[in-house]
Image (cartoon, rainbow, N blue to C red):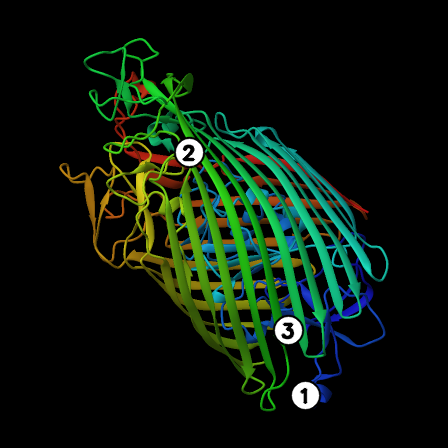
Amino acid sequence: MRVRGLIIISISTGMVVATDAAAAQDEETNVQNLPPVEVVAPPPSVAKRTAPTRPVARIGAPSSAAPKTRLYVYPTAPGTGRGLDVDKVPSAINAVDASQIKRTGSLNVTDALRDNIAGVNITEVTGNPFQPDVEFRGFVASPVVGTPQGLAVYQNGVRINEAFSDAVNWDLIPTAAIRSVTLVTNNPAFGLNALGGALNLQMKDGFTYQGAEVDVMGGSFGRIQGSAQWGKQVDQNYAVYAALEGLRDNGFRNFSQSTVRRFYGDVGYRAGDSEFHVNMGAAKNKFGASATVPAELLDKYWGATYTTPQTTSNRVGYLNLTGKVDATPTWTFEGSARVRRFEQNIVDGNPTDVEECAADATLLCFGDDTSPANGAGGGQLANPYAPGTILGAIDRGSIRSSTFGVSGQATNTDQLFGHDNRFVMGSTYDASVTRYNASSEIGSMGENYVVSGSGVFLGPTPAADPVAGPVSLRTVNQYNGLYAMDTFNVTDAFAITGGGRFNAARISLEDQLGTALNGYHTFTRFNPIIGGTYKITPGLTAYAGYSEANRVPTPLELGCADPARPCLIAAFLVADPPLKQVVSKTVEAGFRGTKELNIGTLGWKIGGFRATNHDDIMAVPVVGRTGFGYFSNVGRTRRQGLEAEVNIKSPTLQFQASYAFVDARFLDPLELGSESPFADDASETIQVRPGNQIPAIPRHRVKVGVDYAVTDVWKVGGNALFVSSQYIVGDESNQFAKLPSYTVFNLHTSYQVAKNIQLYGRVDNIFDRRYATYGQFFDREALPNFTNGGNDFTDPRSLSPARPRAFYAGMRVTF
């Protein structure tokens, strides 16, 4: 937002800042890095409980002669309208602003979340930095199809968890166009998947961002990227905004090239107390190296890959219409309508259970050397390769989803019994149709672990012993939500919040090749919330709350839930038994505060949480069949912990330090299939006991970041990240050695060459630390270790290697 000589007063911190912004400057933020809302209102002493008139809020409104203050609010519902004063929010406050995103020099918004939010941890399960898992408090938002998703993600009030699997494709989000990201916890109003919380992305528009910016950067591993954004308020009523991003990165691993192309645009209209927007976006991205690597291969070469090809192609296009009307001084109505088209193609080279038959090497068998592997016509497949050839498979899957949704929300701020009160109610409806197809092509496995196809495809799956044959499935999701929430000021210092959301989900599966996958499932659930805040002093607030949330099984999980008929997870579906929905019950409490110091504004917070999942869902592997498994309810799990943060903000210094402790455990006994060396030889299972830690969730995370203005034009900074050890996936019984902890240091600097030209650079992983962010067990007998003379693998671990030291430099020009 452009302002000239405007005095900004934060009613939340008492901080006064004078600013004279240049072209295309991101707006100043404060109070947990939230974008401010300008409020035109009489002084508080006059307005206090005299009449039910509401201050008129304008996001990014131009200055006028009317008195203005800056109010910092937090979202309490999926809508794009004004949120709740941060002092009244009965949960932790976590937010990232546009300047923090820009400071990373990255087109991944997840990097800013990792660096600036205490409880967030990034795991590169796919082996590609542009498709990370975001883990928060032990809950995950992942692009990996088949990962149980515990975080909901919204963009401009629209839920963008994909319809077929609830996956979150972070690469599709236009990072330069993000105005702010808030991580909302302990709030069921955000609907399905918000077990651990909801990430709420608000995008820029021509009213909040004016000017133009071009940003280009290049560096290690063939990285070249660029972004351009432009915003303009055409007149008093109209504004336009557009952002374009592109990136190419060769990656440090074999076959790990990445290509990203994204566009976002917004046209806004404002008249009086009404505001309407049309925003649209499109992306077309492609990625390689989408899997872990046996540890023994990484010991030979850090850039190794295992079973190639492995590529993912994502495409998306969406159109959203939003409107907000201040109907009266105390009633605001808003609504939205949206349409979204998502397409994904996955090509995955794998080991295979297809082998030449013992009786006749010219024929193919499956699972053993006697059971026939059938082709498309139902007859046994001929072996297209010479006897003794090591076979593999190229598995292909495609997802085509079309989603339509509408929502409405009303907010009322009439006083209740003479006390300030804020009431919100709304409803949402989303319908998605998905077509899913998968096939498996027999191939030969080279000594570089590259699978070469033969043109021979596996046929329909036999009932007795499932083969990864073709799948064609049509699914329909219908999600309805109705929510209401009220915040009542008992006194000026004490506020209570109560409400809840009712979710109804209907999912139908229609097998296009037979009837095995057919099914119809209905899930309903009411999730309550109750909480309160108490402002102990003007700079200290206490909060506490309890809420419940749920997620329903996805079409993918419902189509792969039978232990007797496992499927190649994320590719082949073979059964349709029922699964229960997951219900999470969360309690959260803590303190937060601000204080003015000589060196700047001090902000701090500390809080604890406990979330208990009932009927949690896991992906359970089948031993001896690489990639095969099924989804199952596994009883209760618990995630609890502590988060603490301190930060200082001033014109010359930005400092932040945080610590998060996450304790994630199973509460019920389980028997799970596992490739663990400690698995029972007869049953090939491990015994999970109550109290065992959940793998892939590090218990300790420490983050420190600092930025210092050496001169008016030169800034330097750096950050450090410590992540403690974690059990690897497959070691739910906690018997194997943990994946080691790691500490990473990064540096960055910028120099303002001219008023509108900035040069910047950064060094990631400055000490070139070699570490892995994720690990799992794998089938050591599926393929020989070609780097060790074709002998068997001895290390049971397969890891996701982190990026080595990398150098980047760029230039940013504003107009």
Amino acid type, callout 3: Thr
Q: CA distance from mark 1 to mark 2?
A: 59 Å
Amino acid type, callout 1: Lys
Q: CA distance from mark 3 to mark 1?
A: 19 Å
Mark found first going from the N terminus, 2 or 3: 3
In the figure, is residue 270 to the left or right of 563?
Answer: right
Against 610, residue 695 (above or below) is above
Which residue position is annotated with label 3? 13
Q: Quadrant of the image for the N terminus?
A: bottom right
- Provide residue 407's location: percent of width, then percent of height: 59, 62
- Provide residue 788's location: percent of width, then percent of height: 30, 19
Number of residues whose C-alpha sits closer than 10 Å to that of mark 2, classed few (under 14), some (14–19) or many (20 or more) = many
Mark found first going from the N terminus, 1 or 2: 1
Q: Which residue shows up at 22% across the image and 11% down it?
A: 360
Pointer 2 with pointer 3, Cβ within 8 A: no
Q: Quadrant of residue 50?
A: bottom right
Against 393, residue 291 (above or below) is below
In the figure, is residue 128 to the left or right of 260?
Answer: left
Against 680, residue 707 (above or below) is below
Which residue position is annotated with label 1? 48
Which residue position is annotated with label 2? 291
**Pick the front one: 591 or 451:** 451
Question: Helix, strand or loop at disc 3?
Answer: loop
